[in-house]
Image (tube, rainbow, N blue to C red):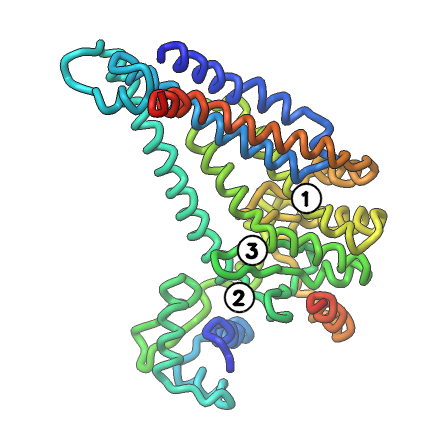
Amino acid sequence: MATLGELERAIMDLLWRDDVSLSAYDLQEALADRKLAPTTILTVLSRLEAKGFVIRDRRSRPHLYAAAATREDHMAELMHEVLGGASDRVAVLERFVGQVSRDEAETLRRLLGS
Amino acid sequence: MILTAAALGVLAVLLAWPVPVLLARARWTRRSPGTALILWQAVALAGGLAMIGSLLVFGLAPYGDDLVSAFLAVDDRSGEPWHWIALAAAGLLGAHLLLNLLATVIRAEHQRRRHAHLVTLLSEPLGANARIIDSPTPIAYCLPGPLSSVTVFSAGLVALLDERELRAVIEHEKAHVVQRHDVVLIAFRAWFAALPWFPIAYRAQREVGLLVEMLADDRARRVVEDAELARAIEAVGSGADAAASVWAEPGTPDTLNARVARLALAPLSVAREALIVGSAAALIGVPTALLLAPAALALFS
């Protein structure tokens, strides 16, 4: 059962991926396997909008939603908060390197469980 | 009572300046960070007690020979303005410290929640209380929470460290969570934020943060060799090791060197540790006794 946070991430991933504006219907379709009610999607989008992650275009019908900033922007923001002022150690527009390998993830999971 | 006020005043001054300076410079703290942290907390607590206590006792001095009877005998007629000023100062200082603590906690919780949200959006879950963000910068840190904490790793860190080194990092972060270092660090941050005139507030705060890291390192040493821990410290330090409290200063070369260098030091003997903890208790006992003993004696005589 996906939590609210996981759902927010799924929606942001969709908005970030193609850098497009989507309507709530588009999102519901893209996440069809989760069988979400439209109100759920709208609630999540409202939350994301309130927190500044999503911009709503009210001029169009239906309303279109877009990411307020790129994924890299937010990652840089996170890194900046973690590393304090030492952002010279972080390339602000770092490329997304790729997933952790399955072996590595498995090792970490095992170590965390012990 | 004037004498008691003077004694408490002297104690307050000692605990505000020379004692923290000596403690920050002491080398034994590296060998037993846990007891050092206990002593630091005692210094702060006793310092606060002495500060407010000396003002309180001086303010109530015209009305009696011990705190309780003087408090009960307070009236508007006698007493010079200095005593009223001291009483007001005691009240204001106490309120200031409490409000500052409240403000610091609220601000920190705000920041934490925002950051936690950011982490949720940018990471995948990993096990029960951990997340992994896809960044090549090697980082590992603990995001404390009032109910549950989350440990955050980066893909870069996992790729960089071998299994033993990862184990060391995990144990280190677990220490922050289990031992609730965030509470200690927030308390100190509030303390120093409330007293900007505290001569070495910044240095003392860094020292406490460093001791907290070393304490967490000690937990990692239970499961890995010192050499492996040293490598892990340096690897994570190349990214950051933001400690348990919200965004403590990241690992500078000095702090990383200090953490690695102290691994070679022998731990303190149990006897010495007991002595230090006893001193901490005595340190809190002194202002408490000065404040309450006369009243207690009057009660029983």
> Residue tagged by mark 3?
B143
What secondary structure is found at the residue carrying circle 1? helix
Image height check: is B212 above or below B137?
A: above
- Amino acid carrying label 2: it is Thr
Mark 2: secondary structure: helix
- Residue B157 placement: quadrant: bottom right
How many residues crowd mark 2 within 10 Å: few (<14), some (14–19), many (20+)? many
- CA gap between label 3 and label 1 equals 17 Å
- First reached walking from the N terminus: tag 3 or tag 1: 3
Residue B161 visible: yes
Q: How many marks?
A: 3
Q: Earlier in the sequence, mark 3 or mark 2?
A: 2
Q: Decide: is B265 above or below B142.
A: above
> Which mark identifies residue B215?
1
Residue type highlighted by circle 3: Leu
What number is the disc on residue B40?
Answer: none
> Both on one chain, marks 3 and 1?
yes
Counting from the top left corner in percent of width and height, residue A57 is at 35, 72
| Residue at 52% from the left image edge and 76% from the top image edge | A10
The amino acid type found where label 1 is placed reads Leu
> Label 3: few (<14), some or many (≥20) within 10 Å?
many
Residue A40 is situated, as x and y percent measured from the top left of the image, at 38, 80
> Which residue is disc 2 drawn over?
B120
Is B67 left or right of B105, judged from the image as shown? left
- Seen from the viewer's position, the closer of residues B292 and A31 is B292
Question: Marks 2 and 1, Cα distance to the nearest angstrom?
Answer: 28 Å
